Image: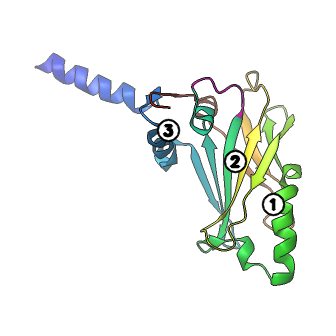
Amino acid sequence: MRSLFILFISLAFFSCGNPPKQFTTVNDGLQYISEIKHGFVKDTLLGNGVEVKIQLLPASLVQKNNNPGKQKYFSIQFSLKGHELLAQLPREEYGAYVQLFSFGMERYIFLQSESGKEYPASMVSYQPTYNMGKSNELIVVFNEDFSSCKALKLVVKEFGLNIGQIDFPLDLANFNYSPTIEQL
């Protein structure tokens, strides 16, 4: 009986830290990475009330295949008091920032290694939701080989809304996480 108890405690202890290697469906995987306790989501509330949330999206969950390649995906969301940040701007600024989010944010978002080397995003995508959502979301893609990096952070530089530069240190285990999906 004592051996069984020790085995149970050992299994519980060692299985807690490792993310699952496989999910039955993509939705199961997305649900797992959406839970803050697993470390794929980071949230920052700035002094002016702006909330910036990033989520690392494993490529196998985005591309819906088990051989995703080297692409790294992030979701970056901007909100103010639970609503879209851009929709709360003065009317004369709103259009300019929708234009910036749609066509210019790649100049302000990059990954930075421990040596200071910057890796620009290969694509930044924004779909306006016209005040129908809770945040303005950017999907950011990096298409580089990061295997030699010992530390990385996602950087969002100041882009005109006086929120300053925001640095998000990344957990490399989560950054390199690539689960397989049973039912594609």
The residue that label 2 is drawn on is: 168
Can you see residue 121? Answer: no
Residue drawn where x is 61% and y is 68% of the image: 133
Image coordinates for residue 106, horizontal then vertical, percent: 85, 49
Q: Are marks 1 and 2 in contact (CB under 8 Å)?
A: no
Does residue 88 show up magenta in the picture?
no
Magenta range: 66-71
The residue that label 3 is drawn on is: 26
Residue drawn where x is 86% and y is 56% of the image: 103
Q: Residues within 10 Å of mark 3 (few under 14, many from 20)?
A: many
How much space separates mark 3 and mark 1, taking CA atoms? Answer: 28 Å
Q: Earlier in the sequence, mark 1 or mark 2?
A: 1
- Its colouring scheme is rainbow
Of tags 1 and 2, the one toward the viewer is 1
The furthest residue to the front? 184
Front residue of 95/49: it is: 95
The furthest residue to the bottom? 91
Residue drawn where x is 17% and y is 19% of the image: 4
The residue that label 1 is drawn on is: 101
**Quarter of the figure with residue 50:** bottom right
